[in-house]
Structure formats: structure tokens, C-alpha cells
Image (cartoon, helix red, strand yellow):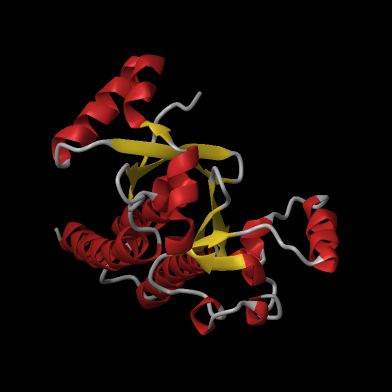
């Protein structure tokens, strides 16, 4: 009975700690659909498996008040759990989205890990873009450079997979590019015809929002693309929908 009680207490504490980390991920670092876009669920499964499931099960297996090495056993289990949790939280923090960048006809997500140091950040035209957000990505736009030297730098960087979204010196206020976004956007309703899953997701979105017209642009991170839903009147960024794109 004591063994089961100890495992349940361990489980309760583990759920509290993992729940706090999950709250940070879902509502602070990766809010508004970025969690799914960036594949955060894969790491959460690992963290939950180690901290919520494996830890209490190990406690259930080793707990015996008469055992001389009980404190050491529990300390080792706790150390393994804390190490796994800290590693997972560190990876998620380092990979958190810091900029959501409109590049003419697509949104591209910039991660904290895209910046090896702050040298590139300090070239931004505004102070608010010179530091990495802790509370979700900043919505900005990037415009094509006019300086030939910068153009050459961007072309060279593109060879290694970099794009405008990792060059803060190209950033401008999103407000200045709203009309560009609307010009390139397409009606969200058009995606309903691509699949039954699309129709279900979009109709659910429409039921949850006011009756007005919505458009979309692709939002991309790595090899994953979803739909960034915009208000068709003012290009306000509404939500990320996990739907099939053309």
C-alpha cells in the first residue's frame, strides 16, 4: 500500500511540473498554432513519457521503506526526471518562434536557434527587433533590399537555406505591408474543396469566428506548411490552420 501511495504522490508531482512546462509551451512560447506547426508535440510525448509515466513506475518498482538504498534509488530517479525535463524545456526554449515574417506571399517563422549570436539582430532598424521574444513571435514583414551588397549577401545565404526571415535588417512593420498580404492572399473557403478534412476544419473555424470573409497565405517552418488565416478587410493575423494547401 505504501508503494502505491508513493507512486501516486510521485505521479501527482510529476503532472504538476510537466503541466507547468506544457503551459509555457502552449500559451507563451508556442501560442496560437505555432506548437503544432513546429512539431512541439513530438518532444512533449517524450517528456511526458519520462516524467509522467516512467518516473512514477520506477518509484512503484523500487519503493520499500525497509530498503537501505531507498533514498539513493529515489534520488537517481528524480535526477533522471529533472535532467530529461530540463533538456526538453531547453530544446523547446531554444527552438521557440521569435518572428513571424511576411515575405510578400508567404509567412516564414524564424526560430531563436536561427541566430547563433546577436550580431545580425543588432542590424535591425528598430530596438524591439534587436532582442528575441520570450512570449511568442513578433509579427513583422521583410522587404527586398535595394543595396547591392545586401542583395549579394542574401543570395549567398540562400545557398545554405537562409532567407529574408533571418535578416532583421530587412524587417519593416507589418502594418506597412498589409495591402501586399491582401493582394497575394486567397479566399480561405477555396481550401474546402481539397479534402473532407479541410472542409471540417474550416467550417469549425467559421463557426468559432464572426461572419466575415477570411483569406489565407501559406505559413512555413522547415518542410511544414499550414494556412495563416487573415481578416480579408484589414489583413489582421487571426490563426494558423492545419489544412492541406494546393
| Residue 112 visible in the picture | no
Write down the quadrant of residue 70 in the picture.
Answer: bottom left
Residue 227, x across and y down, in percent: 42, 38
Residue 102, x across and y down, in percent: 52, 53
Write down the quadrant of residue 196 in the picture.
Answer: top left
Q: How many marks?
A: 0
Residue toward you, 191 or 57: 191
Left or right? Give the position of 101 relative to 159: left
Q: In which quarter of the image is the N terminus?
A: bottom left
Q: Please tell me whether residue 137 is drawn above or below residue 221 in the rendered image.
A: below
Residue 116, x across and y down, in percent: 69, 72
Residue placed at 80% from the left, 60% from the top?
Answer: 151
Residue 9, x across and y down, in percent: 19, 65
| Residue 100 visible in the picture | yes
Residue toward you, 159 or 2: 159
Q: Please tell me whether residue 206 is drawn above or below residue 73 in the rendered image.
A: above
Left or right? Give the position of 139 relative to 157: left
Residue placed at 19% from the left, 57% from the top?
Answer: 4
Residue placed at 85% from the left, 67% from the top?
Answer: 149
Residue toward you, 77 or 41: 41
Left or right? Give the position of 116 relative to 241: right
Left or right? Give the position of 242 relative to 16: right
Residue placed at 82% from the left, 54% from the top?
Answer: 155
Amino acid at each position: 500500500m505504501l508503494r502505491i501511495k508513493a507512486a501516486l504522490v510521485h505521479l501527482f508531482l510529476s503532472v504538476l511540473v510537466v503541466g507547468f512546462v506544457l503551459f509555457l509551451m502552449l500559451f507563451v512560447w508556442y501560442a496560437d498554432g505555432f506548437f503544432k506547426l513546429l512539431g512541439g508535440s513530438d518532444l512533449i510525448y517524450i517528456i511526458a513519457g519520462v516524467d509522467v509515466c516512467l518516473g512514477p513506475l520506477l518509484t512503484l518498482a523500487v519503493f520499500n521503506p525497509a530498503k537501505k538504498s531507498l533514498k539513493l534509488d529515489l534520488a537517481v530517479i528524480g535526477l533522471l526526471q529533472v535532467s530529461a525535463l530540463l533538456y526538453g524545456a531547453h530544446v523547446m526554449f531554444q527552438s521557440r518562434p521569435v518572428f513571424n515574417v511576411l515575405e510578400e506571399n508567404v509567412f516564414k517563422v524564424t526560430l531563436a536557434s536561427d541566430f547563433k549570436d546577436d550580431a545580425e539582430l543588432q542590424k535591425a532598424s528598430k530596438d524591439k527587433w534587436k532582442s528575441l521574444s520570450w512570449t511568442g513571435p513578433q509579427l513583422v514583414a521583410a522587404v527586398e533590399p535595394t543595396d547591392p551588397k545586401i542583395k549579394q549577401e542574401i543570395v549567398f545565404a540562400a545557398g545554405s537555406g537562409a532567407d529574408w526571415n533571418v535578416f532583421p535588417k530587412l524587417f519593416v512593420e507589418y502594418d506597412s505591408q498589409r495591402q501586399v498580404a491582401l493582394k497575394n492572399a486567397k479566399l480561405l473557403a477555396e481550401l474546402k474543396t481539397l479534402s473532407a478534412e479541410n472542409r471540417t476544419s474550416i467550417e469549425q473555424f467559421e463557426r468559432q469566428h464572426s461572419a466575415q470573409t477570411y483569406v489565407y497565405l501559406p505559413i512555413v517552418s522547415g518542410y511544414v506548411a499550414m494556412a495563416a488565416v487573415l481578416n480579408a478587410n484589414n489583413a489582421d493575423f487571426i490563426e494558423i490552420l492545419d489544412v492541406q494547401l494546393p
